[in-house]
Image (spheres, grey):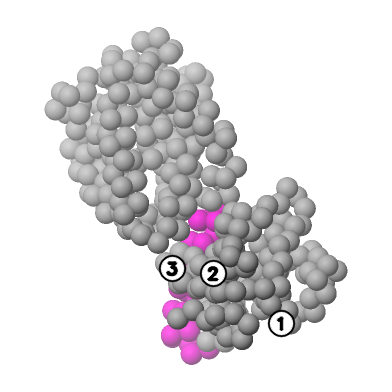
Amino acid sequence: MNIIQLLGSTLGLGLVSGINLYATVLVVGVGIRLGWIVPRPELHDLEVLSNPIVIGVAGVLFVVEFLADKIQWVDSVWDSVHTFIRPVGAVLIGVAALGETSPASVVIALLCGGVALSGHSTKAGVRLLVNHSPEPVSNVALSLVEDVFVVAGAYIALQYPYAMLIVVVVFVIGFLWFAPKAFRLVRIEVLAIFALCKKFFANIGNLFSGAQSSLSDTFANDEMPVDYVHHAQDKFKLDGQALVVKSAAGKGVRGLRHSIGYFNLTPDQVVFISKRLLRLRDFAIPRSKIEHVQFKKQLLLDRLVLRVAGKQHIFYFFKDASNRAENISTALEQDPNHDRLQ
């Protein structure tokens, strides 16, 4: 097998592993066992995936992922957990495929993991965007497309490596454009998981200790960093009386979309402060100009929509034990100068 074929097969398996690791292992394992896939002699070590135990474990995990992938926000939680599992799994598949530990094989295995991370980041980022849509149909449709792509991609990677290498190259070129957005979205997703876990453990601790206030403070989202505080004081004259919650900017927050920062609610205005390109930036809305407020609790992130002059400005709040997001939404919804959303 020449180097082009080798790269087509290993990087192709890396790409589909980044999207669905268990489906890749299952397809390759079952395909080899039933004779549907015949690895070239250089990749004969992939036959380890046809072991009944490997197939059984991969099958169970595939069923779990198949179901989780179809549920809004549960899919994002699942992707967050697999941020490191999929790339590492892809590296192991690459090592198994090459069957040796020469310098060249190590480089190819690492490339396999890198392509897997790219595939995973793209999937996780797109899923996070789709989850913000109000209907669940798009989640199911996208998940089914991914499943078909993984099954077909795993087969093509081993049987038609030249074609798969073209797919990988096209994907990587597209990923280079999408990468900054993808990594910002993955970062939001991972931090949201940590925040959700903090809230969960805080609530468990409160249940057994009865010391709700102290534990809530311990597990609440961190306060604004000192440089953020100084920026807020210097530019907006915020005196520490604002309600503050860690959040991410969404659609309509000009120049800061998908940035992580801090949402400040003062008696006069809403101020979002974030660090972008190593400098502090902000976005402010006078409360008197807010026409409508919509707040929705979701599994991973709570969503706040502020309508100003007919345009929507969206913020996503990380969970915390003090429920600051709900306090902010309540304060905004009770403003007398705009309609209150039921």
Q: Residues within 10 Å of mark 3 (few under 14, many from 20)?
A: some
Q: Quadrant of the N terminus?
A: top left
- Check disc 2 and report the residue beneath it: 304
Q: Quadrant of residue 11?
A: top left
Of callouts 1 and 3, the N-terminal one:
1
Nearer to us: label 1 or label 3: 1
- Check disc 3 and report the residue beneath it: 298
Residue at the spot 80% in from the left edge and 79% down from the top edge: 239
Look at the numbered disc 2 and give the secondary structure of its residue: strand
- Residue 319 visible in this rendered orientation of the protein: no
Instruction: Give the alpha-carbon distance from disc 3 to disc 2, as whole Å.
Output: 11 Å
- Residue farthest to the right? 234
Instruction: Give the alpha-carbon distance from disc 2 to disc 1, as whole Å.
Output: 18 Å
**Amino acid at pointer 3:** Gln
Q: Which mark is residue 124?
A: none
Instruction: Check contact, mark 3 vs mark 2: CB within 8 A.
Output: no
Of callouts 2 and 1, the N-terminal one:
1
The chief SS type of the magenta part is: helix
Q: Which residues are magenta?
A: 187-211
Residue at the spot 49% in from the left edge and 18% down from the top edge: 104
Look at the numbered disc 3 and give the secondary structure of its residue: loop
218 sits to left or right of 172: right
**Amino acid at pointer 1:** Pro
> Residue 199 colored magenta?
yes
Q: Which mark is residue 267?
A: 1
Q: Position of residue 240 (x, y in %)?
A: 76, 79
